[in-house]
Image (cartoon, rainbow, N blue to C red):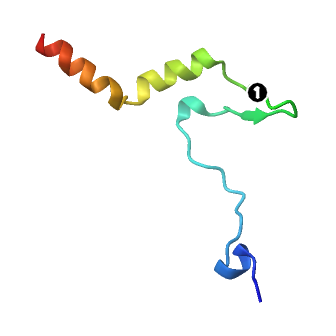
Amino acid sequence: MFKSFRARYNFQRTAAKPKVNRELEGFEIKINSAGEIESSYTIDQLNEFLNRKVFDKKLQNEVENNDIQ
């Protein structure tokens, strides 16, 4: 009567790797048995990458306000 999600929608897992930015190749993140996050990059390296590549919408208003003054 009840089919699993996979059977109902013909869903199958693939072993394909996701597309990533070239700068993040080799990046791995895991959660150990104690619930701690383990990463192949330091937090500073990740923050530096995000600061360069991601636009922060929250900071847009601050930049516009500083330009007006």
**Element under disc 1:** strand
Across and down, in percent, residue 24 comes to: 59, 31
Q: Position of residue 36 (x, y in %)?
A: 78, 27
Percent x, y for residue 38? Answer: 76, 27
Q: Residue furthest left?
A: 68
Residue depicted at x 62% and y 19%:
43
Is 62 rendered above or below residue 21?
A: above
Q: Badge 1, how many Cα within 10 Å: few under 14, some, many 20+?
A: few
Q: In the depicted view, which residue is nearer to us: 33 or 21?
A: 33
Q: Quadrant of residue 34?
A: top right
Q: Is residue 1 above or below residue 8?
A: below
Q: Is residue 25 above or below residue 4?
A: above
Q: In this image, 41 relative to 69: left or right?
A: right
The quarter of the picture where residue 3 lies is bottom right
Give x and y (percent) for residue 62. Answer: 26, 19
Residue drawn 66% across the image and 32% down it: 27
Q: Which residue is mark 1?
A: 38
**Quadrant of the image containing the N terminus:** bottom right
Which residue is painted at 71% across and 33% down in the image?
Answer: 29
